[in-house]
Amino acid sequence: VQLQASGGGLVQAGGSLRLSCVASGLIFDDYAIAWFRQAPGKEREGISGISIVDGSRYYVDSVKGRFTISSDNAKNTVYLQMNSLKPQDTAVYYCAAGVQATMKSKKFRADYWGQGTLVTVSS
């Protein structure tokens, strides 16, 4: 199983980025895909997730209304559209896959992790 995250970069505050996570080697339809981030000196936090099974989505409060998670099942890809970026969004962003049917429980257990992609938001 491979998860390939991409799309990070340097952006000014208020700008946008779209992260992509391409999954291979798994049955995409059985999984939920989540995005985590880890800022310097901080613990990794889960920020958003989507169940490919039922389409349910989860957002942590700090990104609600600014970030949108979506999937293109034909491409085994999950996107994280990030708008109105803030300097505090600066972090390494990781995608992860877990076998679960829904994100309605707001819980996620990762079975596989991708490499990170760095997002830097300048003020």
Image (cartoon, grey):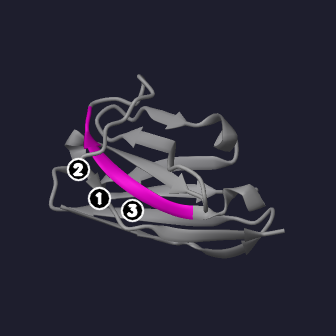
* Picture quadrant where residue 110 is located: top left
Check residue 43 for magenta coloring. no
Type of amino acid at the residue the image marks with label 2: Phe
Q: Look at mark 1 in the image and give the residue it sits on.
A: 76
Left or right, 45 with reference to 87:
left
| Element assignment for label 1 | loop
Name the residue that disc number 2 marks: 28
Mark-to-mark CA distance, 2 and 1: 6 Å
Q: Secondary structure at mark 2?
A: helix
Dots 3, 2 in contact, CB < 8 A:
no
Check the picture and name the quadrant holding the N terminus: bottom left
Q: In the rendered structure, which segment of residues is drawn in magenta?
A: 92-100
94 shown above or below 36? below
Q: Residue furthest top?
A: 105
**Relative horizontal placement of residue 96, taking residue 79 as reference (left or right):** left
- Residue 15, image x, y percentages: 75, 66
Q: Are marks 2 and 1 in contact (CB under 8 Å)?
A: yes
In front: 10, or 22? Answer: 10
Q: Position of residue 38 (x, y in %)?
A: 54, 56
Assess whether residue 97 is covered by the magenta stretch. Answer: yes
Residue at x-position 41% and y-position 22%: 105
Residue 32: mark in rendering: none
Q: Earlier in the sequence, mark 1 or mark 3?
A: 3
- Mark 3 residue element: strand
Q: Position of residue 78 (x, y in %)?
A: 40, 55
Locate the C terminus by quadrant.
bottom right
Amino acid at circle 3: Cys
Percent position of residue 30, x then y: 20, 41
Between the residue at mark 1 and the residue at mark 3, the CA separation in whole angstroms equals: 8 Å
The dominant secondary structure in magenta is: strand
Name the one closer to the observer, 76 or 13.
13
Which of the numbered marks, if any, corresponds to residue 21?
Answer: 3
